Amino acid sequence: YFEGKDNILDIGSGRGEFIELLIENGKKQVLGIDLNRQMIERCQETNLPVKHYDGVKYLEENDNLKLGGIFSSQVIEHLKPSQISKLIKNAYKNLEEGGVLIMETINPMCLVTHAMTYPLDLTHKQLVHPFTIAMLLEEYGFKNIDFIYSSRNDKEDPLLKIEGIDESKLEKYNEKIKRMYELIFGYQDYA
């Protein structure tokens, strides 16, 4: 997604893994922003280009950074709805034509995340449905909206294979099992 792009902003850069990956792949203009001072200090110890600042505010205070891309992993679930809207609106005005915005978050369509992932971090404010994000992206002018699902819980095939049973009934049953299985044990994250 960032191939052929430069001037990339990582909002919520944390330990700087994505910044390191970008630099290793020849990106020259990269900036990480995070509110966690310990993470910023850690990144600065290894000379990563980071600054202590609020990413939503940074985009709001600028009008045309001509960014080739914005990456934000596991951030929007920590924001209020108004902040998510501001992030998307101001990302659009700061991306160059053809720029990419990738926001990864917890997938609320996977029920396991409600019990095992989301409640682990007390700073989470809400789960954000992908359809809500798609609506906001469209509202603020984004085109070519795609979803990437990742971190599958269980890769086991739950479908029944029984000989001697009416194939059409078995197919209907397996379709229902597959939908239920995806809802419970599907992908933990989406971007």
Image (cartoon, rainbow, N blue to C red):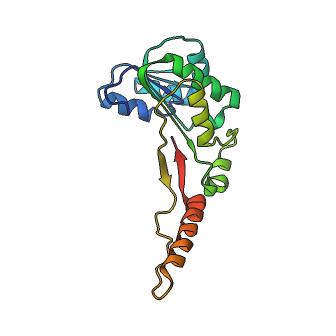
Q: Which residue is drawn at 41% across and 29% down?
A: 19
Foreground of the two, 174 or 70: 174
Q: What is the x, y in percent for residue 70? A: 47, 26
Left or right position of 65 against 2:
right
Is residue 36 visible to the viewer in this orientation of the structure? no
Left or right position of 72 against 80:
left
Q: Residue at x 62, y 53 (%)?
A: 113
Q: Which residue is drawn at 55% across and 11% down?
A: 62
Q: Residue at x 56, y 73 (%)?
A: 173
Does residue 69 lie above or below 60 as drawn? below
Q: What is the x, y in percent for residue 151? A: 49, 52
Q: What is the x, y in percent for residue 65? A: 47, 13
The quarter of the picture where the N terminus appears is top left
Foreground of the two, 91 or 112: 91
Outermost residue toward the left in this view: 26
Outermost residue toward the bottom in this view: 164
Left or right position of 94 against 119:
left
Does residue 30 lie above or below 170 as drawn? above
Q: What is the x, y in percent for residue 25? A: 30, 31
Is residue 51 visible to the viewer in this orientation of the structure? yes
Q: Quadrant of residue 29?
A: top left
**Tag count in the figure?**
0
Does residue 35 lie above or below 175 as drawn? above
Does residue 145 lie above or below 117 as drawn? above
